[in-house]
Amino acid sequence: MSRFPLFAMAVLGLGLVFLYVPTLLVIATSFNESRLAGVWTGFSLRWYGELLNDRQFLNATANSLIVAGLSATAATALGTCAGLVLARHGRFRGRVLFLGLLATPLVLPEVIIGLSMLLVFVAAEQTLGWPAGRGIGTIVVAHATLAMTYIAYIVQARLTGLSRECEEAASDLGASPLRVLTAITLPMIAPAMGAGWLLAFVLSLDDLVIASFTSGPQSTTLPMVIFSAVRLGVSPKINALASVLVVMSAVCLGLAAWLQARRGGKVLPE
Amino acid sequence: MSPIDSPAVRRTTVWIPYLWLAVFALLPLILTLKISLAQMQLGVPPYTPLIGADEVGQKTWLGTLANYKLLAADSLYVSAYLNSVRIAAVSTLLALLLGYPMAYAIARAPQHWRVPLLMLVLLPFWTSFLIRVYAWVGLLRPTGLINSALLSMGFIDTPLRLINTEFAVYLGMVFCYLPYMLLPLYARLEKLDASLIEAALDLGATPVRAFWRITLPLSLPGIYAGCLLVFVPAVGEFVIPELLGGADVLMIGKVLWSEFFSNRDWPVSSAVASVLLVILVVPLLALQFYKTERAP
């Protein structure tokens, strides 16, 4: 029995090295003064300084933060509703379709999601006149749809772990259903909603494919800038840019984990 | 009946997300199928309508299967689909071979280690996908860290060709999709009753036999779910073959991307996406099956 776990432990160790070392090397080389990746000439913040003077980078960062903030907020509202449906409603007509639709953004290849979303926006513009052109707004809608699934699963996990006693007590004492929802249920799932918001923010911040399909000429996001730069070759400036993105994601994730762990919840949906 | 099951609250919480999903998850797929029957044209929108009217106002059907005939006739598309399925399948297998021992080690670790270890494995999943692929570009290219290190140590005279190969694509796929594999495997292995294995060992089975006859069969649902979770997105993957595979590795995600962004042919892009969707329907339904079976 003991030989296999030993082997498994070794693979786990190697696997973790495999998962972390490449990204950590990018962060390390971003502080390298030299333009060449293989030669370490000294610690320097030079490449970060160059980023701050790069108007294209600053614009893209602003766009990314706006898109991420708005889409995370919309996704939290939608995902919380969907989570309530999953956890608290028994069977209802169309439940299977609901579950299937909710899971689609999670499993479909991104190119299909991106293209098909774009087609909806164009068709809506043709028939309804909205949205007038593509830009921040259309990326927000696409990202909100993608992230609401994750939030629904997190909220569902939270709700199934909670007893209904408080809700029932409030109801017995005469609170209206809406008041039970706002005064009891929502505060109880608030940490899950907060963690979900942060995960949605990270998802949006990182997305390249869906944003490329649904964006307009004025709404280049940070991953789009990185992608076109990487196609031209590796540069120390991209290393710095990548490190900024990794650190932003890590901070959000740390906060999300802390929010969830406070009451023994789970950070990631199973 | 729980108070928030009241009809008013219930209706609102169901209808808002339901409508949203109908408009932004179901309708997009229907539109993709529809536009795959149209033809490219210059103008806004860049595709022809499916129903037209002649001089006397008679409605006529203009839809055509020309795009699908093109996909079937051109060997570029056919081999892109076949390649994608093959590369995704090999990547899935590699992820399973690496992921199974990892998930097993976490599931057999002392109780208080499990959650931190699981977090450690899943954290990279939430840090930028694009950056993780880019990290491998920096490692694998001819002037990258691996080649520089090997050259300076004198193991090789000329840089190895690591990037723009299928090998690099496999590396990228396993690296990026490993967490998808680990999660369902861990969930299954953690619930596995250790006393079953002890019983087998007490009755004289070797550890290897106990693994093959008990652990592996009981973890099969986790294996299926993990494999499907890796396979489905890997078939349509764009970023990894684009940045690590280069021009030599043909995958359908890249084809779709260039049909759309370079050729600006929306109907052919839609047809490519529709066929991909059809290829993925069976694995997607199987995934849904294993997920609902696993749910309490």
Image: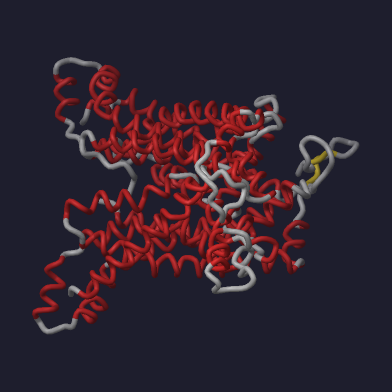
Residue B97 appearing in the image = yes
Q: Position of residue A213 (x, y in %)?
A: 65, 41
Displayed quadrant of residue B210: bottom left
Q: Is residue B78 shown above or below B274?
A: below
Front-lying residue, B235 or B33 = B235
Q: Is residue A7 shown above or below B205?
A: above
What residue is rendered at 33% in x and 39% in y? A154
Residue B28 appearing in the image = no
Front-lying residue, A125 or A149 = A149
What residue is rendered at 66% in x and 28% in y? A55
| Horizontal relation, residue B277 to residue B250: left or right | left
Front-lying residue, A21 or B86 = A21
Front-lying residue, B66 or A250 = A250
Displayed quadrant of residue B217: bottom left
Q: Is residue A64 shown above or below B264?
A: above
What residue is rendered at 52% in x and 39% in y? A44
Q: Position of residue A180 (x, y in %)?
A: 24, 20
In this picture the colour scheme is secondary structure
Residue found farthest to the right: B55
Q: Is residue A123 shown above or below B232?
A: above
Q: Position of residue A72 (x, y in %)?
A: 46, 30
Displayed quadrant of residue B207: bottom left
| Horizontal relation, residue B35 to residue B147: left or right | right
Residue found farthest to the front: A41
Q: Position of residue B148 (x, y in %)?
A: 57, 62
| Horizontal relation, residue A155 to residue A109: left or right | left
